[in-house]
Image: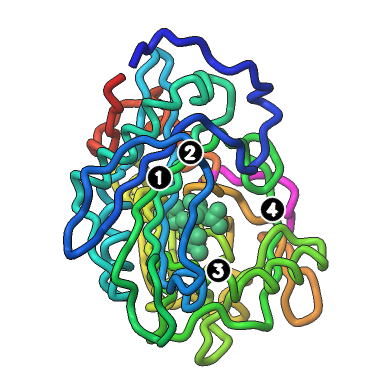
Amino acid sequence: MDAKVSKKNLNWAELGFQYHKTDYRFSAVHRDGQWSEGALVSDEMISVHEGAPTLHYAQQCFEGMKAQTAEDGRVLLFRPELNSQRMNDAAGRLLMPEVPQDLFLRGVEEAVRANYAWIPPYGSGASLYVRPMLIGVGENLGLKPAREFEFRVFVSPVGPYYQQQGLALISLAVSEMDRAAPRGTGSYKVGANYAGGLMATRKAQELGANEALYLDAAQGRYIDEAGSANIIIAMDNNTLVTPDSRAILPSITRRSLMDIAARQMQMKTEQRPVDLRGEFAEFREMAACGTAAVLSPVGRIWFDNDWHVVNGDGQSVGPVMQELYDRLTGIQNGERADEFGWLHEVEL
Ligand code: PLP
Ligand code: COI
């Protein structure tokens, strides 16, 4: 691929988090117990059998990651091996074949490289969102796993998820609906979890919030996560807390932020159940975090029929979240030293 191919003429700074058709996607098929070599294709449409288990029984999982352009032109992925691992955890849970890590990484790299012209330039504020997916296809009717599967990776240039550029406060509304049961599929990135969440997100938005916040399904007491992101909370005593729950997605962004806090900011870190009503008064700063969300500080939360402002202000970004954001995004875009060894450069 000629890395000097010119960039598309997009208004990168104005991009939202929408699908933007790019030129190529990677596709491999699992049939008779074997993965095909996989190849780039240009057709964005997938043709599947009307009985395909992905359509009826949600036998599918997906991943989300971003490629960024560094100042020196390198194209950087952030910890893609963890996305590969998480996809295979989901595949195992839904009786789908694992995607070998070398196939996963090759698919991601080929899709990114082939769409070089769509990778937002350094400093544009946008990035290339990468969506790997694994779906159960082929003819089927009864409740049983598919016999054929497709692994596909498409990419799309994106801007901020919650509509604001840079570090801006968001609001969350506690959902009256549950996202996932303690022994359900909440800790896997499977589409079924998200279908049930569409209405919760809609209701949160009707209240004027950006996203739903879920409490644990058993007691409705402890914070689980937001509809599209994990939660982190800065408490007094230089402590960063994140909810411990079997029902939430193990966010790669959250794990990275906890490491940054512990090792670069000398904070105490805790993963433990967080009682929303019982501990809210102690919250100094709070944020949602994820690949799409990056780090989005939370200014206020709706629960018990009222808005509750985080730390009595709700207007400004606190110093802990600001520093975490700067450190994380600085590593991701190559501006800061990658002392954890998290970056994966895509050969152009
Ligand atoms: N929680 C949910 C429900 C998500 O959809 C995501 C997005 O991937 C996250 C958390 C954040 O995970 P990650 O940081 O690995 O993107
Ligand atoms: C991501 O952050 O990558 C996600 O998958 C969240 C999704 C709801 C857009």
Task: Tell me the element at label 1.
Answer: strand
Q: Which residue is mark 1?
A: 153
Q: In screen coordinates, is 313 left or right of 154?
A: right
Quadrant where the C terminus sits is: top left
Q: CA distance from mark 3 to mark 4?
A: 20 Å
Instruction: Give the residue drawn at x 30%, y 27%.
Output: 346
The answer to the question of whether label 2 and label 4 lie on touching residues, with beta carbons closer than 8 A, is no
Q: In screen coordinates, is 32 left or right of 312?
A: left
Amino acid on which disc 2 is placed: Val
Q: Which residue is mark 3?
A: 194
Eye-nearest disc, 3 or 2:
2
Amino acid on which disc 4 is placed: Ile
Q: Is residue 219 above or below residue 238?
A: below
The answer to the question of whether label 3 and label 1 lie on touching residues, with beta carbons closer than 8 A, is no
Quadrant housing residue 317: top right
Q: Residues within 10 Å of mark 4 (few under 14, many from 20)?
A: many
Q: Is residue 60 above or below residue 46?
A: below
Amino acid on which disc 3 is placed: Tyr
Q: CA distance from mark 3 to mark 1?
A: 19 Å
Residue 77: x %, y % from top left: 35, 35
Q: Which residue is mark 2?
A: 155
Eye-nearest disc, 4 or 1:
1
Q: In screen coordinates, is 341 left or right of 202?
A: left
